[in-house]
């Protein structure tokens, strides 16, 4: 696949951004313990700041979840511009050959625009995992007429991909490859399929942080890239405008300023694409700026809002108002400009050619850990000791910690039916991240792990799966000869049912 052409890099002050605002943003992220994986701040089509929190790096194809919805919206705009269908076309007519039997009058009125605005016929849509989910969606009993009430509906966005595939004769990924992805240099990306061979319109894309930056900058430039119109004229304004009141939505996203065509309205006249766990593309027209983030905020309800709050508190006011020394305005030719020689493009990226304190701090970013220490008196007391575990849902029967700096390990055992023992060992670093393999839950997936002592008796071990939005936290408390571990699993792949407590009693006195 073609690698994304790099956007130009500049020093923050060259585009009217105070470096102290970027420093403050990094400080707030750490202070509020946000599991941020990467961020970028663009102004006037150039990257003024970017950071990758090791071991996440610039080349990783990160799951972007529902940002895929906004990409699907772009695909709909392009298809409408090509005359393949229009906003008022009925879904049942565009997908007629998928339907057998009667269609409810409500569903018969469902249009492309209703799907884009999330004012469909369902409060909770049918699953897209059935063998013929298109038929299921269009023939299940609806709950409301279309066009009235907002309900966040991933299946409805998936239906847009079915319409696109039906009217173009190709998958949405193939359709967009020359028209969008290659046209703006989004670089390598992948897109999952549903059981029917249709791209999952509501989720499923993986791409780089830079690829997301290209997508956001395209919208800031009204759909023009290098003087070429990629999105139909007027589509950006129409698709990002407020079309639907989302006051009834249970999630929090900058309050509830409204919803467009698969885009969220935000404060200060901004709009954005949002994906589960803190994936953001935020377009700020008044600042001529774009903000990108990838993260895993699933540990806290509405944790994604913390990222937005940090952005609004630190980055937004650090940008001078347009016309007040903010640098040249972005145009259709502002993007796709290669980074100048001397700019660093590394795990944490220094903008400009000098090695300022900010650049060094960006280059040294790591995933956040709770405040704590790499050691405690208790560590020596329990180091290498074996614990017999009480019955638990994972079938673990034994546990042993080895605290040895970057070579520390957690060993969990299960008793085999034949009387033998099956052991899984998870390496970790003390107050330092190491890459490892998760042999405990996912099989053999790459992960990063680190532990820190938050008080004299409590050690918290974090594990991040690198290819999936999933964390595992081992909150370990030691007292005399008893150990209690609370397993917490923030993410989308491990279910809450896997969370449990492991209670153990020390079985030996020696090492």
Image (cartoon, rainbow, N blue to C red):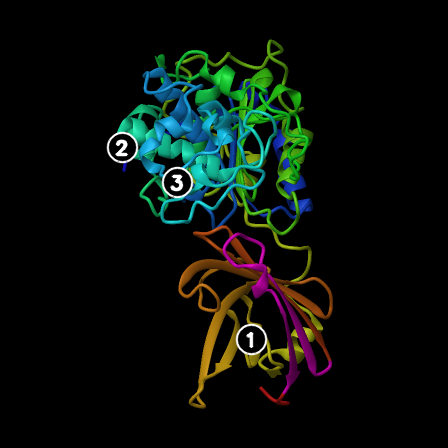
Instruction: Estimate the spatial distance between the alpha carbons at disc 2 and disc 3, rounded to whole Å.
Output: 19 Å
Q: Work out whether residue 332 or residue 171 is closer to the camera in this orientation and state it.
A: 171
Is residue 343 visible to the viewer in this orientation of the structure? no
Quarter of the picture holding the C terminus: bottom right
2 or 3: mark nearer the eye: 3
In this picture, is 474 found above or below 313?
below
Question: Nearer the N terminus, badge 2 or badge 1?
Answer: 2
Q: How would you rate the neighbour count of disc 1 (Cα within 10 Å): few for under 14, some for 14-19, many for 20 or more?
A: some
Mark 1 and mark 3: Cα distance apart in space: 55 Å
Circle 3: is it few (<14), some (14-19), or many (20+) Cα within 10 Å?
some
Secondary structure beneath label 3: helix
Q: Element at badge 1?
A: strand
Which of the two discs, 1 and 3, labels the residue nearer the N terminus? 3
Q: Earlier in the sequence, mark 2 or mark 3?
A: 3
Residue 337 lies within the magenta run: no
Quadrant hosting residue 193: top left
Question: Callout 2 environment at 10 Å: few (<14), some (14 to 19), or many (20+)?
Answer: few
Which residue is located at x 62 percent, y 11 percent? Answer: 324
Answer yes or no: is residue 80 visible: yes
Q: Are marks 2 and 1 in contact (CB under 8 Å)?
A: no
Magenta extent: 480-506
The location of residue 147, given as percent across then percent down, is 56, 24
Question: In this figure, what is the number of numbered marks?
Answer: 3
Instruction: Check if residue 483 falls in the magenta segment.
Output: yes
* Number of the front mark, 2 or 1: 2
Residue 186 pos. (x, y %): 37, 31
Q: Is residue 94 above or below residue 302?
A: above
Under circle 2, the secondary element is loop
Q: Which residue is mark 3?
A: 135
Q: Position of residue 405 (x, y in %)?
A: 55, 67
The residue carrying mark 2 is: 170
The residue singled out by tag 1 in the image is: 402
């Amino acid at each position: 696949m073609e690698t994304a052409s790099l956007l130009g890099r500049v020093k923050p002050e060259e585009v009217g951004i105070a470096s102290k605002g970027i420093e403050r943003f990094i400080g707030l992220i750490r202070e509020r313990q946000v599991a941020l994986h990467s961020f970028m701040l663009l102004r006037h089509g150039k990257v003024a700041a970017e950071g990758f929190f090791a071991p996440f790096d610039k080349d990783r194809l990160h799951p972007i979840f529902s940002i895929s919805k906004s990409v699907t919206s772009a695909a709909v705009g392009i298809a409408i511009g090509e005359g393949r269908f229009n906003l008022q076309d009925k879904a049942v007519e565009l997908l007629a050959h998928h339907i057998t039997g009667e269609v409810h009058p409500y569903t018969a009125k469902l249009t492309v625009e209703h799907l884009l605005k999330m004012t469909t016929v369902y409060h909770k849509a049918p699953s897209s995992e059935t063998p013929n989910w298109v038929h299921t969606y269009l023939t299940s009993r609806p709950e409301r007429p279309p066009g009235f009430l907002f309900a966040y509906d991933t299946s409805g966005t998936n239906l847009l991909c079915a319409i696109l595939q039906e009217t173009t004769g190709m998958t949405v990924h193939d359709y967009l490859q020359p028209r969008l992805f290659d046209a703006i240099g989004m670089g390598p990306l992948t897109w999952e399929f549903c059981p029917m061979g249709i791209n999952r319109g509501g989720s499923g894309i993986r791409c780089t942080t830079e690829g997301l930056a290209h997508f956001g900058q395209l919208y800031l430039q009204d759909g023009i890239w290098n003087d070429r119109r990629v999105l139909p004229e007027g589509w950006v304004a129409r698709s990002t405008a407020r079309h639907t009141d989302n006051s009834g939505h249970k999630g929090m996203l900058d309050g509830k300023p409204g919803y467009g065509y698969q885009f969220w309205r935000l404060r200060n006249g901004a709009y954005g694409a949002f994906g589960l766990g803190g994936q953001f593309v935020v377009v700020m027209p008044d600042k001529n700026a774009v903000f990108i983030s990838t993260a895993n905020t699933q540990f806290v309800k509405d944790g994604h809002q913390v990222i937005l709050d940090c952005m609004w508190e630190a980055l937004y006011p650090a940008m001078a108002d347009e016309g007040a020394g903010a640098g040249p305005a972005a145009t259709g030719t502002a993007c796709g400009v290669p980074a100048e020689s001397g700019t660093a493009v590394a795990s944490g990226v220094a903008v400009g050619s000098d090695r300022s304190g900010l650049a060094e701090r960006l280059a040294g970013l790591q995933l956040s850990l709770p405040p704590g220490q790499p050691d405690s008196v208790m560590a020596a007391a329990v180091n290498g000791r074996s614990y017999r575990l009480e019955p638990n849902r994972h079938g673990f029967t034994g546990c042993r910690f080895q605290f040895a700096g970057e070579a520390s390990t957690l060993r969990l055992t299960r008793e085999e039916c034949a009387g033998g023992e099956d052991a899984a060992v998870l390496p970790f670093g003390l107050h330092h991240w190491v890459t490892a393999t998760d042999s405990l839950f996912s099989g053999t997936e790459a992960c990063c792990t680190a532990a820190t002592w938050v008080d004299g008796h409590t050690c918290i071990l974090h594990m991040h799966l690198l290819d999936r939005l999933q964390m595992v936290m081992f909150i370990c408390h030691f007292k005399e000869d008893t150990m209690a571990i609370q397993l917490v699993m923030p993410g989308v792949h491990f279910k809450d049912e896997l969370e449990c407590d492991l209670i153990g009693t020390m079985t030996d006195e020696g090492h």
